[in-house]
Image (cartoon, helix red, strand yellow):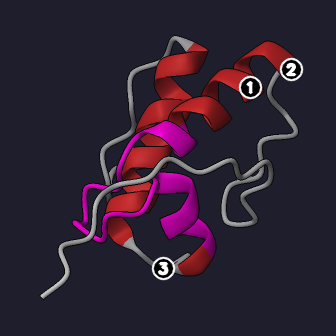
């Protein structure tokens, strides 16, 4: 049995998460975190990789929205909240 380790990625565009509306410094920080943090779903991929390969992953989507909100200085939105 091979146990897979987390390896950060270097993805610069995440189709499931349009970041063009962010200022360049915020976009870079968001991309850095998306590439360096493992997806909480347990897939051993970065959040960026999981979103790219599995755009429907609820864990990756929630984590990405939280990162974007944090980098904007906002409170993260609750899933299912207006």
3D distance between C-alphas at marks 1 and 3: 23 Å
63 over 14 or under it: above or below: above
Q: Is residue 31 magenta?
A: no
Dot 2 lies on which element?
Answer: helix
Q: Tell me residue 12's x, y (percent).
A: 79, 48
Residue on which disc 2 sits = 24
Q: Quadrant of the N terminus?
A: bottom left
Q: Quadrant of residue 44?
A: bottom left
Name the outermost residue toward the left. 1
Q: Tell me residue 8's x, y (percent).
A: 50, 47
Residue on which disc 1 sits = 28
Segment colored magenta: 34-52
**Seen in the image, is 69 located left or right of residue 39?**
right
51 over 24 or under it: above or below: below
Question: Which mark, by number, is residue 57?
Answer: none
Dot 3 lies on which element?
Answer: loop
3D distance between C-alphas at marks 1 and 2: 6 Å
What residue sits 32% from the left and 54% below the top?
Answer: 79
The residue closer to the viewer here, 42 or 74, is 42
Residue on which disc 3 sits = 56
**Seen in the image, is 60 located left or right of residue 29?**
left
Name the outermost residue toward the front. 1
What residue sits 49% from the left and 68% below the top?
Answer: 50
Q: Nearer the viewer, mark 1 or mark 3?
A: 1
């Amino acid at each position: 049995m091979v146990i897979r380790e987390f390896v950060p990625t270097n993805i610069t565009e995440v189709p499931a998460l349009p970041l063009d509306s962010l200022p360049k410094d915020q976009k870079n920080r968001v991309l850095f975190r998306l590439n360096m943090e493992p997806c909480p779903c347990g897939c051993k991929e970065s959040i960026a990789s999981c979103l790219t390969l599995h755009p429907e992953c609820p864990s990756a989507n929630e984590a990405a929205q939280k990162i974007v909100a944090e980098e904007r200085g906002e409170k993260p939105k609750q899933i299912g909240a207006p």
